[in-house]
Structures are given as C-alpha cells and as structure tokens.
Amino acid sequence: MNGKPTGKTGSLTPRNTNWKPPACWYEPRYSPKELKSMIESWEDFKFMSIGPMIAEAYKGIFQTDKYDDYNMKKQGKGKFWVAVINEKRKGEPEAMSCDKPPFWVDEGKTPDEPLAISSRILAEYAYDELPVPDTDITMNPSGKQTVNLDTWIWLDKARFKPVSAKASLPSIGLSATTTAKPVSLTIEPGTQDAKVHPASGECRIAADGSIGTPYSDDKKNQAPPCGVTYLRATNQTGPHPLKATVTWEISWTSSDGDGGALPTGTYGDTTDVTVGEVQSINR
C-alpha cells in the first residue's frame, strides 16, 4: 500500500449500493505436479474419511481422458486455475459464485470466464484495502456547543490526502493500484433544529487540499464556510449525533495499461454534540 495515513483507518462504502468489490475470482495456481501432489496429500486426512473421499472425487476429474493424469504432458505449459475467496467478503452469498473445480488454461491464454482474474478485478479487490483515515473533524468551539452560535468544522489537511492500495499476482506479472482522493465533507447535524453551512451540508475540497477553514479570531463575525448552527438546546433531548462523512473519488491504473474510475466511496464518523444556552457569548 502507498500513502497510508497515520492514525486509525477504515474501509470505504461504495455510494452505488448496487456495486461491491469482488467476493471471489479464479486465478492460476497449480502446475500438474502441484495439483496431483495436493490431492494425494488429502488421502492422509483420515478424520471421518473426509480426506480420502475428497481425494477420490477429484481423482475422478483429473485422471480422466479430459486431463490424462493431471495434464502431466503439459507440465510447464500452463496452470490449473482455482477459485479464490475475498476474505473480507467470505460470508456473502456472492462468495459462493466461484464454484468450479480447478480447470486448465494454457500459458498465455485467458479463460472464457467472467470471474477470471484481471487487472480490473485486482483494482476492485484493492478498493477494499484502501486505508482511508477516520473522519475525525475539528470543531470550534470544541466540546459543548451553544444555541445560535456558529460552529466551525474542518479536517486536518495533513491527514486527508490521496491514498492508494496495490494488489498484484506475481505469477502472471499482473498488478493494479487503486487510489482514493478526498473531494468533500458532508455534515448531518443530527437534528432538524439546526442549519448547516453551506446550506447543502457538503463542504467541497479547496484548491490547496483543505476541507473547511480553521477558525481564528479575525473570523468571529463571519459565517463558517463549513459548519453548523444549532437552534435549540439538548437539555430535553440528549446530545445530537452529528455525522461527518468524507466522499472519496476512486481511480485505478494497472501494469497492463488498463485503468479508469471505480464507484465513489464514503467513510464517516458520528460525534455526540451537547448544546446549551447562555445569555452572552465571549469567544
């Protein structure tokens, strides 16, 4: 991985709820000798005869006329491709989509299989590995807020920079790098008794890479470019769950020259905000 931020990190949630990184795929793994050795080793696993049963079932596939003793005559001329499950998604139904037994592919050929490993699948897998930082906002005033007093919100520019993750398959010399770039911060105050700044609640990234503007005394008569103003105290309702979510644009490149965009991702945190009332304010 490249550009990993300091502090806690998390995983992106695709904004497009109909899209997910791959739960499984097929990739080249075994030579004829390696596959034969592995299957024969299962015969030594005697618990409830499971090992021998599995070995016998696979021998029925790879000792047939189709493969002629595990394709031994093609040793060094290709590989058996196998199903691989994404560990982060092994509990999802899609992880069971790769249900084919190992199958042979000649060297330099690509199988006619939609889930065969490719640079794009590697890039999509790397999407899950992107180390985006926790959405740890800075607020002024800090701590307890005050009714009708603007709260300035911003992010630490040093932490919110583009981050990358690389996935590779050395056996075939294929790799892909997926990069996430922060583009905006969305503020949800956790109550209807508030107004956000800007009115959309979305604070876009500035040309210098900052999101939101740190408060200083010379800005006390200005409305925050990114923030919230609470209109009612929380003494009757309990703290408001202020949610801050960063939106990240995703792109990828690969060793075979392919690349492009992947679905935008988001990652956010919630802060409990207590709001009080006072007669006068001194900042």
Image (cartoon, rainbow, N blue to C red):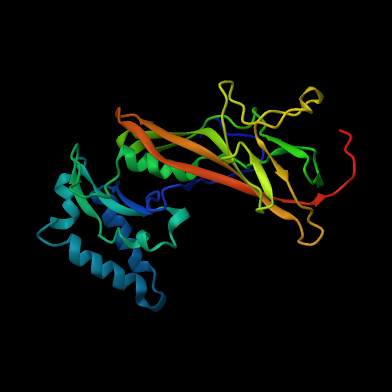
Between 155 and 206, the one nearer to me in the picture: 206
Q: Which residue is farthest bottom? A: 48
Q: Quadrant of residue 67?
A: bottom left
Between 210 and 221, the one nearer to me in the picture: 221
Q: Is residue 133 left or right of residue 30?
A: right
Q: How many marks?
A: 0
Q: Which residue is farthest front? A: 279
Q: Quadrant of residue 263?
A: top left
Q: Is residue 227 left or right of residue 127?
A: right
Q: Position of residue 184 (x, y in %)?
A: 55, 35
Q: Quadrant of residue 218?
A: top right
Residue occupying the point 39% across, 69% down: 45
Q: Which residue is farthest left? A: 65
Q: Is residue 221 left or right of residue 242?
A: right
Between 63 and 17, the one nearer to me in the picture: 17
Residue occupying the point 65% across, 31% down: 225
Q: Position of residue 17 (x, y in %)?
A: 42, 52
Q: Position of residue 227 (x, y in %)?
A: 68, 38
Above or below residue 129? Residue 260 is above
Q: Quadrant of the C terminus?
A: top right
